[in-house]
Image: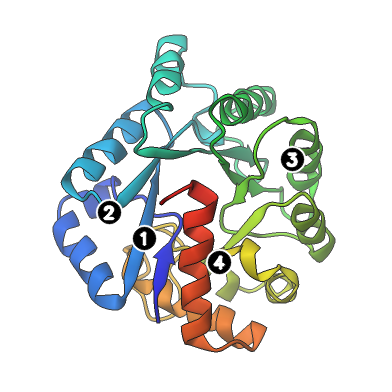
Amino acid sequence: MRLVDSHAHLQSERLLRDVDLVVGAARLAGVERILVPGWDLASTESALALCERFPWLDAAAGVHPHDAASIDAESWIRIVDLAVDPRIVAIGETGLDSERLFSPWDAQLSNLRRNLALSAATGKPAIVHCRSAAGKRDAQDVLLGELRRADAPPPLIHSFSGPVDYGERLIALGATISFSGLVFRPGEESSAEVARLVPPDQVLVETDSPFLSPPGAPRKRNEPEWVRVTADWLADVRGEDRAALGDRLVATYDRIIGRP
């Protein structure tokens, strides 16, 4: 089965020390595309450095909601400059997170808006993280409003989580929905229903390496090779042939990021 990993932080400390082995294992597992998102300036620069070492990787430039309050003006200007680099295929990861308020809400909202504006200016899709406080949907509802108002390409929703109607509204906006190992956790049962609803050309899979390990993967050391577990889950819940799904995952990835 052909595979993609639409979100892997290969530049994280847990993976960077032996990234050659990590990338090699992914290749052996059938992974043909890996997107390495930044979460601040240093991680964006590190993602670009990995693209130099492994030209088949892709990178994204942006600021995560956890870092919204700590990024300074000079660093943001540098990210804007890097965003036009052809190796940068998306903007992010950005988004909103009221589950863990590592940055104040106002800073997160401002950060999301400038990342979406950068997406609009570059024509590159935003990679969007969204988590609401336990038992709530505050971040999802605010995000939907921001996406409707942004004159930007349809976003890539990273590691989908949320109620079914939230997924339906994202699909209507043309968003691509990416599923991760999060789908295997208790409380995420709605992801299976959303996965059945997503049009074939709007669905992707990811690992969020080194986080969100699926069953069988090391708990604190997820790697791109383990995306195969989530891809198998997706094929099962959608009732699709694995080979056909693999071909479509690669085609969707290439279309979303404009890869020739």
Question: Could you say which disc has been placed on residue 182 in the image?
Answer: 4
Mark in front: 4 vs 3 = 3
Mark 3 or mark 1: which comes first in sequence? 1
The reply to whether the C-beta atoms of the residues labelled 3 and 2 are less than 8 Å apart is: no
For the residues marked 3 and 1, what is the alpha-carbon distance in whole angstroms? 27 Å
Q: Secondary structure at mark 3?
A: helix
Residue type at mark 3: give it: Leu
Mark in front: 4 vs 2 = 2
Left or right, residue 239 beside residue 214 = right
Looking at the rendered image, the quarter that the N terminus falls into is: bottom left
Mark 2 or mark 1: which comes first in sequence? 1
- What residue occupies the far right of the structure in this picture? 165
Question: Could you say which disc has been placed on residue 85 in the image?
Answer: none
Residue type at mark 2: give it: Trp
Mark 3 or mark 2: which comes first in sequence? 2
Residue type at mark 1: give it: Arg
Q: Secondary structure at mark 2?
A: loop
Q: Residue at label 1?
A: 33
Does residue 55 appear in the picture of this structure? yes
Q: Position of residue 241 (x, y in %)?
A: 55, 89
Which residue is located at x 41 percent, y 30 percent? 40
What crowding class fits label 3: few (fewer than 14 Cα within 10 Å), some (14-19), or many (20 or more)? many
Q: Residue at label 2?
A: 56
The reply to whether the C-beta atoms of the residues labelled 4 and 2 are less than 8 Å apart is: no
Q: Residue at label 3?
A: 143
The reply to whether the C-beta atoms of the residues labelled 2 and 1 are less than 8 Å apart is: yes
Choose top left, top right, bottom left or bottom right for residue 192. Answer: bottom right
Mark 4 or mark 1: which comes first in sequence? 1
Mark in front: 4 vs 1 = 1
What crowding class fits label 4: few (fewer than 14 Cα within 10 Å), some (14-19), or many (20 or more)? many
Mark in front: 3 vs 2 = 2
